[in-house]
Amino acid sequence: MKVRTVKTIVSAQRVNMGGHMLDQPLPVNGIYSIDPFLLIHHWDEPLKPGGKQSELGVGPHPHRGFSPVTFIFKGSVRHQDSIGNTAVISAGGTQWMHAGKGIIHSERPGIELVENGGDQEFIQFWVNTPAKYKMEAPYYLPISADDTPKIKKENAEIGIVAGEFESKIGPAKTYSPQTLLRIEAEEKTKLQLPIPHNYNTLLYILNGEVSVDGNQAKSKDMIWFENNGECLELEVLGPTRFIILAGEPIGEPVASYGPFVMNSQEDLQQAVKDFHSGNMGTLKEKFDS
């Protein structure tokens, strides 16, 4: 298989999102999106004990037209939404939500983390949805660590969240072809990872360091690969955790405004109207404390 080369490596920017400081590798430095991936946020901050669940995390807010996805690495995330779902996903799990024609949800830490404090780390990324599926009914899928298929490869463990990878199929339902992986590897591990040649492909490093195509990338770097091969080849230089986001480009116009991602300004205006008129439902949160 032909090995892909590196298009660019960018470092995440530290950004303030509603009072929450986090690392943002996408969009960054003039790279507004990498079809079908629109945004990547990396949260890695401990919580002090004794807080109030109702005052932590992110309260009710709407989405339409894409999938906000959260990989949890430390701690927990409690999800509630306007279509009746409530779930807590802990380290190793994934919160998968397709916003479709509209949903309101909240994202809070689990009650044990709220009461006792501790590390909380997760990545949320937004995946665009093709126009023909944007107005489908929303759905939510909690995926635990145990529900995530895994394979051992060299001195690495690879979790398959979506798509097919070396005979394993991830449980998440995507609306365009994707391969989404979460990987932990030991020092000096050499990996060759097959990825369809037409998939736009990103590698983001939570912590550690890798060498790829004659380049070294470190914690909070995003590697964007050229679409010129069928596999990624890399060497892990120390204990490292990273994710692979690979997907077939949708190739449609993108119009976005806050929590809505559509294909035109008219669609966005309708989304805002629908939200304010209550057509995306309502969410009255219930708390564990």
Image (tube, rainbow, N blue to C red):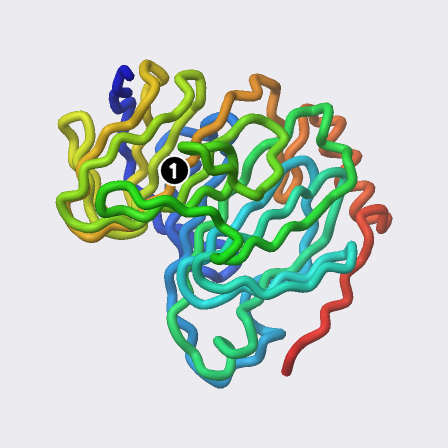
Residue under the image location 73 percent in, 24 percent down: 132
Q: Residues within 10 Å of mark 1 (few under 14, many from 20)?
A: many
Query: Would you identify the image quadrant in which residue 284 lies?
Result: bottom right
Horizontal and vertical percent position of residue 133: 72, 29
Compared across the picture, whether 2 is left or right of 265 comes to left
Question: Looking at the picture, does residue 103 appear above or below residue 163?
Answer: below
Residue bearing the label numbered 1: 244
Q: Assign the N terminus to one quadrant of the image.
A: top left
**Most foreground residue, 92 or 211:** 92
Residue under the image location 24 percent in, 29 percent down: 233
Query: Would you identify the image quadrant in which residue 128 lies?
Result: top right
Question: Looking at the picture, does residue 73 appear above or below residue 273?
Answer: below
Q: How many marks?
A: 1
Name the outermost residue toward the bottom.
Answer: 50
Compared across the picture, whether 119 is left or right of 164 comes to left
Q: Secondary structure at mark 1?
A: strand
Horizontal and vertical percent position of residue 261: 64, 34
Name the outermost residue toward the front.
Answer: 167
Q: Assign the C terminus to one quadrant of the image.
A: bottom right
**Which amino acid, by three-letter code, is at mark 1?**
Ile
Horizontal and vertical percent position of residue 187: 15, 49
Compared across the picture, whether 230 is left or right of 176 comes to left
**Most foreground residue, 155 or 86:** 155
Residue under the image location 43 percent in, 35 percent down: 245
Residue under the image location 54 percent in, 65 percent down: 57
